[in-house]
Image (cartoon, grey):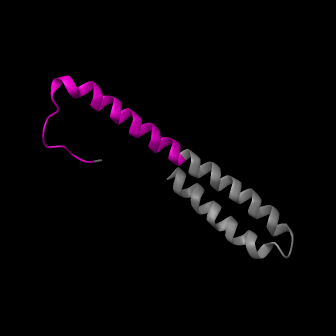
Amino acid sequence: MAVRTESTPLLLTPFVWLWNLVTFILGLTGRLLAVVLGFVLLIVGLLLTVTVIGAIVGIPMLIVGLALVLRGLF
C-alpha cells in the first residue's frame, strides 16, 4: 500500500473513500477468481490423470491448479 505525503482536500475525501472501496473489491474478486480457477484446473487435471494418455497433460494441470489456489489464498 502506497503512503501518501500530501493530504486530500476535504471535498474530495468521499471520492477517495469510494476509490479505495472499489480497488479493495476488485482485488478481492481477483483472488476469488484465482482460487475458483485453480480448483477447476485441479479437478480437470485429476480426471485427466486417471487415464494413462491424459496423465501427460493432467499432472501439469494439477500443479498449475495447486499453485493458483495457494497464490489466491496466501
Q: Is residue 52 left or right of residue 17?
A: right
Q: Is residue 16 left or right of residue 51?
A: left
| Residue under the point 45% across and 37% down | 25
Please tell me which residue is depicted at 12% across the width and 39% down the height of the picture. Answer: 6
Q: Quadrant of residue 45?
A: bottom right
Residue 69 picture location, percent across and down: 59, 55
Looking at the picture, how far across and down is residue 65, in whole percent? Answer: 64, 61
Q: Main secondary structure of the magenta part?
A: helix
> Measured along the vertical axis of the image, is residue 74 above or below residue 10?
below
29 relative to 55 in the view: left or right: left
Looking at the rendering, the stretch of residues picked out in magenta corresponds to: 2-31
**Residue 26 belongs to magenta span:** yes
Where does residue 16 sit, x and y in percent of width and height?
Answer: 28, 32
* Up-down relation of residue 68 to residue 29 (above or below): below
Left or right side of 44 for 36: left
Is residue 70 or residue 18 the one in the foreground? 18
Compare residues 15 and 69 and report the one nearer the observer: 15
Q: Residue furthest left?
A: 6
Residue 54: name its quadrant: bottom right
Q: Is residue 5 magenta?
A: yes
